[in-house]
């Protein structure tokens, strides 16, 4: 997702933020995971922006997607090349207004951006976990976030907001801890992966595992499976765009040349773009973390886990106010998937707003600066905030 | 606010549950929430209008009213409003029955096609009438239904529902001002507004 991040054009920013670590689940009080395994100790990297009010009623929890991290907005140092991944949405006067709300974002467990994951040292072996890391689920990620909220003394979340895999965490929050969640904004997400989404993830995982340097997940003391991870990321980028987005962005234009090279170099701009994105990703992301997080997303099945196969039954667990948003060109989680969750919410008499925003940029549209998206999120949060003040 | 919406608002009891089908930019909903403390929501087809509603803090979802209405539990609302949309509905019978399934009362407003201006245009010019309320040519109009107040009354009786209240209005200057027509409404009114029920309830 990082390729979209730019400095705010109007230079509006939350300013300097700090990455903090919360450590918990020290043995023998390990986290018991959905799959039955125990995990501990657990570290969560998290950041906050804005000010927590006296009665702790202005908390907005943001859940990130596959390759995101706790760095949602602002800068670590004044010289940073880029701000946090959702700087266009989170800041003073922005869609999620840090003058009003206290924003918390933590890195999901299983990731590699400061929270415990497969590249963390396993205290039992004093080596990186690798594939000894237990398979974690969306529910486990949310349980870890809940532990962080307990640590911060936060009992109510004004809203939980997130797109894609972050949106799954939003839904999971509503059903797992319904008393805590006033409102929820699941963006460009689904209650369970389609076969298409699982298929793309599987091809990406196979690309990593087919790289000899992957070595059964045990590569932390040698060369990384850079080629496999780069190909995995290239596949991801295809699914994040759309036919229209690629046509607009690249068409059949050639990269720095007037004619074909008649060899297998990158001739087309789209090839060059994918290679560049793949290569760049390898520098900042761990291949095993990619395997674990995509698996968690594939396993997520809200209907099965919360409603015995029925979305209507699942959403009967929550009383949250919802704003569901999809994007016209998202072919990874198409609008029909958002509509079906809206339907289940309505059947439960829940207060739900839904908008399918017109956008050419495919699944990734939720990450791009979009005045309409910011405006609807701002208006929705304001309503929820005012209703809790009454 | 449009005069027909002012009339509708005056019929709504304070604190009731209201859904506006085809709520546009949410003018009526916002008014009802601010002045009558209703619990209001809406359905609107147009993306930018839906976004405007949500920005204003309204609970609105994007979709086709004919489909979206099916998902609500029975008797979810006190009032189900269909203002100036009936003339664009493909299956009015099914929609009105659904309105009275999810709500206790239905409120329907529509432009009256038998207003004398329409009649005169057709009679004198021989062309399909074009009026301030129905400003389209035959080939670009979204209004696929031609309805008169008399037609609608007849229809409600034929489908076995009841008219609880009925008002005919005449509007001026972009429909923001108007007056109630009591004499010869089917001939003189630009809009009809009716409160309908399924006859089982006391009003």
Image: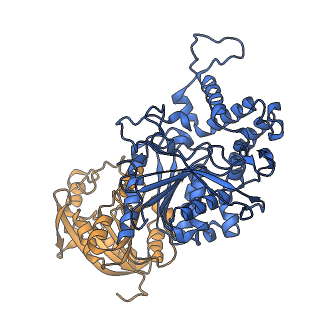
Chain colours: A blue, B orange
The x and y percentages for residue B110 are 31, 65
Q: Is residue A182 left or right of residue A297?
A: left
Is B153 situated above or below A11? below
Is B93 situated above or below A377? below
Outermost residue, bottom direction? Answer: B202
* Picture residue at 66% right of the left edge, 35% below the top: A233
Is A174 situated above or below A245? below
Is B73 situated above or below A59? below
Q: Would you say residue B162 is visible in this rendering?
A: yes
The N terminus of chain A lies in quadrant = top right
The C terminus of chain A lies in quadrant = bottom left
Q: Nearer the viewer, residue B11 or A202?
A: A202
Q: Determine the image quadrant of residue A221.
A: top right
* Picture residue at 57% right of the left edge, 59% below the top: A148
Q: Nearer the viewer, residue A152 or B28?
A: A152
The x and y percentages for residue B20 are 38, 66
The x and y percentages for residue A69 are 57, 45
Q: Is residue A274 left or right of residue A62?
A: right
* Picture residue at 66% right of the left edge, 67% below the top: A306
The x and y percentages for residue A328 are 52, 45
């Amino acid at each position: 997702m990082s390729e979209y991040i730019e400095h705010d054009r109007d230079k509006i920013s939350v300013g300097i933020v700090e990455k903090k670590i919360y450590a918990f689940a020290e043995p023998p009080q390990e986290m018991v995971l959905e799959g039955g395994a125990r995990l501990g100790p657990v570290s969560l990297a998290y950041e906050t922006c804005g000010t927590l009010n006296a009665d702790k009623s202005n908390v907005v929890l943001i859940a990130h997607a596959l390759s995101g991290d706790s760095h949602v907005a602002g800068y670590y140092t004044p010289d940073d090349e880029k701000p946090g991944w959702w700087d266009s949405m989170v800041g003073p006067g922005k869609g999620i207004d840090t003058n009003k709300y206290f924003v918390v974002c933590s890195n999901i467990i299983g990731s590699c951006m400061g929270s415990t994951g497969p590249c963390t040292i396993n205290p039992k072996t004093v080596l990186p976990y690798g594939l000894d890391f237990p398979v974690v689920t969306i529910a486990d990620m949310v349980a870890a976030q809940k532990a962080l909220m307990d640590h911060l003394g936060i009992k109510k979340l004004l809203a939980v907001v997130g797109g894609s895999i972050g949106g799954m965490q939003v839904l999971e929050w509503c059903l797992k801890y319904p008393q805590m969640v006033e409102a929820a904004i699941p963006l460009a997400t689904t209650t369970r992966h389609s076969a298409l989404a699982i298929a793309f993830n599987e091809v990406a995982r196979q690309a990593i595992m087919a790289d000899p340097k992957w070595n059964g997940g045990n590569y932390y003391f040698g060369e990384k499976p850079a080629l496999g991870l780069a190909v995995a990321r290239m596949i991801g980028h295809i699914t994040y765009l759309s036919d229209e987005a690629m046509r607009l962005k690249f068409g059949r234009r050639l990269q720095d040349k007037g004619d074909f090279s008649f060899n297998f170099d990158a001739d087309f701009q789209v090839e060059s773009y994918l290679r560049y994105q793949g290569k760049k990703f390898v520098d900042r992301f761990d291949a095993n973390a990619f395997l674990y997080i995509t698996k968690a997303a594939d396993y997520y099945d809200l209907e099965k886990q919360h409603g015995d196969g029925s979305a209507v039954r699942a959403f009967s667990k929550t009383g949250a106010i919802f704003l569901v948003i999809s994007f016209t060109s998202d072919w990874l989680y198409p609008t029909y998937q958002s509509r079906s969750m809206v339907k289940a919410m309505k059947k439960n008499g829940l207060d739900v707003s839904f908008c399918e925003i017109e956008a050419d940029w495919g699944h990734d549209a939720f990450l791009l600066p979009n005045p309409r998206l910011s405006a609807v999120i701002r208006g929705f949060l304001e309503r929820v905030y005012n209703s809790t003040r009454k | 606010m449009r005069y027909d919406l002012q009339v509708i608002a005056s019929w709504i009891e304070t604190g009731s549950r209201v859904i506006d089908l085809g709520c546009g930019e949410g003018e009526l909903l916002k008014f009802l929430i601010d002045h009558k403390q209703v619990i209001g929501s809406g359905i609107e087809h147009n993306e930018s209008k839906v976004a405007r509603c949500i920005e204003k803090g309204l609970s609105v979802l994007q979709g086709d009213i004919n489909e979206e209405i099916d998902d609500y539990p029975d008797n979810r609302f006190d009032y189900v409003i269909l203002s100036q949309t009936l003339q664009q509905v493909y299956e009015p019978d099914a929609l009105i029955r659904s309105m009275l399934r999810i709500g206790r009362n239905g409120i329907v407003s529509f432009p009256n096609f038998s207003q004398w201006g329409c009649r005169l245009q057709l009679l004198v010019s021989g062309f399909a009438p074009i009026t301030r309320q129905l400003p389209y040519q035959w080939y670009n109009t979204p209004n696929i239904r031609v309805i008169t107040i008399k037609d609608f009354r007849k229809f409600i009786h034929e489908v076995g529902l009841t008219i609880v209240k009925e008002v005919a209005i005449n509007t001026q200057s972009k429909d923001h001002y108007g007056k109630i027509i009591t004499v010869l409404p089917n001939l003189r009114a630009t809009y009809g507004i009716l409160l309908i029920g399924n006859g089982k309830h006391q009003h």
